[in-house]
Structure formats: C-alpha cells, structure tokens
Image: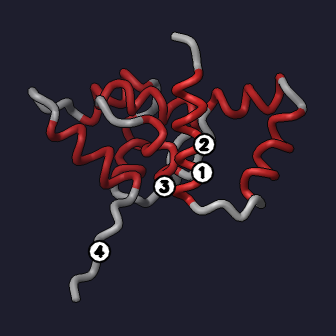
C-alpha cells in the first residue's frame, strides 16, 4: 500500500515558480508579490508560515494556480469570504448551518453546482 504524499504550501510555490517558462527567480517572484526574498525563501522550504491571504492570492495569480487550493494549503481564508462576512451578518450563520447540516461533501457540492447553474451570467 503506497503512502500518499501531501504537498505543503512552500513545496507547491517553489515547484510552480521553477516550472514557469522561463523559470522565475526567487528574488523576482518576491518582488512581484511584494515581499522580502529572505522571507519567501523560508516560506518555500516550509520554515516560515505562509503570508496573508492577499499575498497568497497574488502568488496564485502570478503562478497560474487555483487560488482557493493555494489558500487552503496556506490555511488562509479567501479575501472575498472575509468581505462577505463583514458585509452581511447572515454569512457566518449560513456557514455554521451548512457545516452543521450533516450533508455529505457530495451533497454540498450538488447544492453549489445547482446554485451556480441558477446564477445569471
């Protein structure tokens, strides 16, 4: 039985940066994200915590990665979710109800898919 390897935030960032064509240097990437190269170096080798959500989202944009997956790896909340919580007092209650609903992940995904299908474009 094989052991599944779980990628960590720093590993994903470093690998994606190096796979860019041409590869982006750590210094250039740090500059584009707006952070110190020394800090980014520590993040990439998992010696320091991932940056704030805004920086993680910028990293995803530059690297062409899914921002929600990268935010999940960084253990950060998407900025639009935080904004929704601040704008509408019902948002936190909605999340509590959804999480405590007892629905399976597949059932939650079905609700999401149905909601997206009804959304005007």
Which numbered marker is on residue 108?
1
Q: Marks 3 and 4, how far apart in space?
A: 24 Å
Q: Quadrant of the N terminus?
A: bottom left
Q: Which residue is mark 4?
A: 4
Which mark is in front, 3 or 4? 4
Q: Position of residue 56 (x, y in %)?
A: 48, 36
For this view, does 19 lie left or right of residue 118?
A: left
Q: SS class of the residue under badge 1? A: helix
- The vertical placement of 68 against 119, above or below, is below
Q: Marks 1 and 3, how far apart in space?
A: 34 Å
Which numbered marker is on residue 111?
2
Q: Residue drawn at (56%, 35%), measured in percent from left and top? A: 114
Q: Does the CB distance between marks 3 and 4 fall below 8 Å?
A: no
Which mark is in front, 2 or 4? 2
Q: Residue drawn at (40%, 32%), measured in percent from left and top? A: 59
Q: Position of residue 66 (x, y in %)?
A: 38, 36
């Amino acid at each position: 039985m094989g052991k599944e390897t779980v990628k960590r935030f720093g590993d994903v960032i470093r690998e994606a940066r190096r796979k860019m064509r041409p590869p982006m240097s750590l210094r250039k990437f740090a500059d584009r994200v707006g952070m110190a190269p020394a800090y980014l170096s520590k993040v990439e080798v998992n010696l320091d915590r991932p940056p704030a959500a805004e920086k993680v989202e910028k990293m995803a944009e530059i690297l062409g990665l899914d921002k929600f997956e990268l935010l999940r790896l960084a253990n950060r909340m998407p900025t639009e979710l935080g904004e929704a919580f601040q704008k509408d007092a019902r948002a936190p209650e909605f999340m509590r109800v959804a999480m405590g609903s007892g629905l399976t992940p597949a059932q939650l995904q079905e609700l999401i898919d149905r909601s997206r299908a009804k959304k005007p474009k």
